Image (spheres, helix red, strand yellow):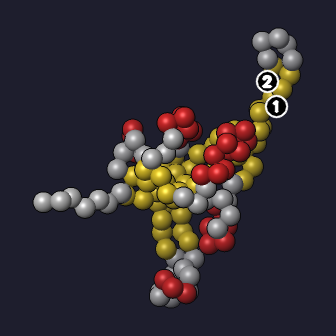
Amino acid sequence: MWPDDYAFLLNNAEEVEIDVLPTVKDMISPSQTITRKALKAVISQQDFEKIWPLAEARYRLNGRFSGKAITLITNNPHYRSWHPSDGGSVESVSDSGKPYTTHYVVVHFLLDDVRETVDA
């Protein structure tokens, strides 16, 4: 299960479709692409560093994405176009008056339906 501590990172995630070039094992024409569902989220660099250890593993979701599972794309060569990228930064001022910058990252999670067998 996706950790509850990080559930807020998916609150504003957008469902998108990504087109992936096939690998040799996919057994389709190299000119065809495979379309996959994904979640696109903009999160702070600090939060991204916290979830980095969760990358490339599949996690089930609760809430609005119940029945789905996600896999954070980080460095898989087949998904190079969807590796984490710069999401910009926001300049702010703290309550004490000190300026600070929050850096953001655009991340993609592969999104799959969860299929379970049921004992009859």
Left-right relation of 96 to 68 = right
| In the depicted structure, whether residue 40 falls above or below residue 11 | below
Tell whether label 1 touches label 2 (CB within 8 Å).
yes
Q: Residue 112 lies in what quarter of the image? A: bottom left
Q: Residue 44 lies in what quarter of the image? A: top right
Within-10-Å neighbours for mark 1: few <14, some 14–19, many 20+: few
| In the depicted structure, whether residue 1 falls above or below residue 83 | above
Badge 1 element: strand
Residue visible at 56% across and 82% down in the picture: 23
Residue 45: image location, x then y, percent: 73, 41
Residue 120: image location, x then y, percent: 12, 60
Left-right relation of 94 to 58 = right
Amino acid at circle 1? Thr
Residue visible at 49% across and 57% down in the picture: 58
**Label disc, if present, on residue 101 of the rendered structure:** 1
Q: Kindly give the residue lying farthest to the left in the view shown.
A: 120
Q: According to the image, label 2 marks what residue?
A: 92
C-alpha gap between disc 2 and disc 1: 6 Å
Amino acid at circle 2? Ser
Q: Is residue 11 visible?
A: no
| In the depicted structure, whether residue 90 falls above or below residue 109 | above
Left-right relation of 18 to 93 = left
Which mark sits nearer the N-terminus, 2 or 1? 2
